[in-house]
Image (tube, rainbow, N blue to C red):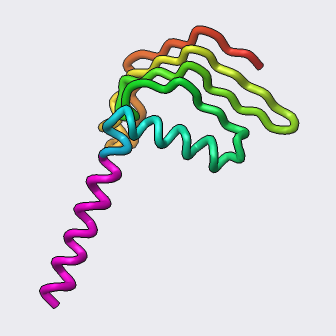
Amino acid sequence: MRRLTLALASTLLVVSTGLFALIASEAGLQTLATLANRLSGERLQILAVEGRLLGPLKIGTLRWQDSTTRIEVSDLQLDWQASALWQKHVQIDALRIQHVRL
């Protein structure tokens, strides 16, 4: 029983560390953008990302395209408070978009 508890605690620690790395690092943000691109069947394209998902972050191009819709956002900059999600709020401190094409 002690081994099982230790194994579960170790697994939880590894998974938590990995998730934190995804949201708290630039490499994690780039990984999440690539994953989103693939999971959408390339309908969603997130290109030239910088920063962290926790903020601030920059996206050079954010594009959605399917058979009926095409939306493109250029030079998106976002600074927000992710911790506000714990209170069921979205707090955006700064949002800048250079260009939107519909």
Answer with left or right where residue 73 lies relative to residue 97: right
**Would you say residue 4 sits in the magenta stretch?**
yes
Quarter where residue 81 is shown: top left
Residue at 39 percent of width and 40 percent of height? 28
Quick one: which residue is furthest to the bottom in this view? 1
**Would you say residue 69 sits in the magenta stretch?**
no
Is residue 66 shown above or below 94?
Answer: below
Q: Which residues are magenta?
A: 1-20
On the image, the x and y values in percent for residue 32 come to 49, 42
Answer with left or right where residue 55 lies relative to residue 38: left
All told, the count of numbered labels is: 0
Work out which quarter of the rendered image holds the N terminus and state it.
bottom left
Answer with left or right where residue 31 lies relative to residue 11: right
Is residue 38 shown above or below 55?
Answer: below
Residue at 73 percent of width and 16 percent of height? 101
Residue at 26 percent of width and 61 percent of height? 14
Residue at 65 percent of width and 33 percent of height? 45
Work out which quarter of the rendered image holds the C terminus and state it.
top right
On the image, the x and y values in percent for residue 99 come to 64, 10
Return the residue nearer the eye: 56 or 30.
30
Quick one: which residue is furthest to the right in this view? 68
- The kind of secondary structure the magenta stretch mainly shows is helix
Quick one: which residue is furthest to the top in this view? 98
Quarter where residue 85 is shown: top left
